[in-house]
Image (spheres, rainbow, N blue to C red):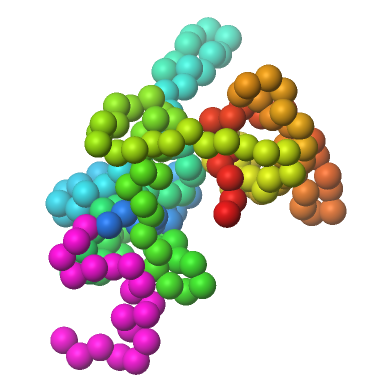
Amino acid sequence: MKRGRGHSRRLGDLHPTEKRWFAVRTHFKWEKLVHGRLKKKDIEVYLPLLHVVRRYASKTKHVQLPLINNFVFVKITESEYIKVLETEGAIFFLKDAKVLKAIPEREIAILRLVVGEEIDPSIDVVPISYDVGQEVEIVRGQLAGMKGKLVEQKGKKKFVVELTGMDLELRMEIEMDMIRPLT
């Protein structure tokens, strides 16, 4: 197959034989549908789900919600790239400066830990340490995707994060497992 100029650069970390993890953006609230469609195509796919209890006036419901809205994770080789893009509901691969970047196996393991799944013991997951002033991103909840700065530590697992954006400054207390450091 003849490749156009810049083709291999855009495909970045995709490898012809080694499977690697990538994030795929989905249509709004289509994460579970895309997950199922990719499984039917024999694509290795991961959708981290949180088990949540919703309480209503007359009943209690147990639901599974995506940890990260509008994304699924696929472990693919270069030959599976087009199959993923051709999947209904899959919009695009997450890229860094227009180049496809693989997600390290240990970061997928961290997602598995966050949602309470068992992980492969051969994967080394080192606890993350945080410092006041460090830039972080919220990875769970309604504010997922927002970035801010740690301004105070409250106990061992709680921090005060200052979120800035939209000409608004907001400080909030947040659990350690809801944030990740930005490099």
Dividing the picture into quadrants, the one containing residue 132 is: top right
Q: Quadrant of the C terminus?
A: bottom right
Please report the residue visible at 34 percent of the width from the left and 74 percent of the height from the top: 11
Q: Is residue 177 above or below residue 70?
A: above
Magenta part mainly helix, strand or loop?
loop
Residue 67 x %, y %: 46, 37
Dividing the picture into quadrants, the one containing residue 170 is: top right
Q: Is residue 147 above or below residue 172?
A: below
Residue 81 x %, y %: 26, 66
Q: Is residue 92 visible?
A: no
- Nearer to the camera, 157 or 127: 127
Residue 168 x %, y %: 84, 48
Q: Is residue 114 visible?
A: yes
* Residue 86 is inside the magenta segment: no
**Residue interval drawn in magenta:** 1-19
Residue 77 x %, y %: 21, 63
Q: Residue furthest top?
A: 58
- Nearer to the camera, 159 or 37: 159
Please report the residue visible at 76 percent of the width from the left and 32 percent of the height from the top: 152
Q: Is residue 65 above or below residue 52?
A: below
Please report the residue visible at 72 percent of the width from the left and 28 percent of the height from the top: 153
Please report the residue visible at 48 percent of the width from the left and 17 percent of the height from the top: 53
Q: Quadrant of the N terminus?
A: bottom left
| 48 relative to 132 in the view: left or right | left
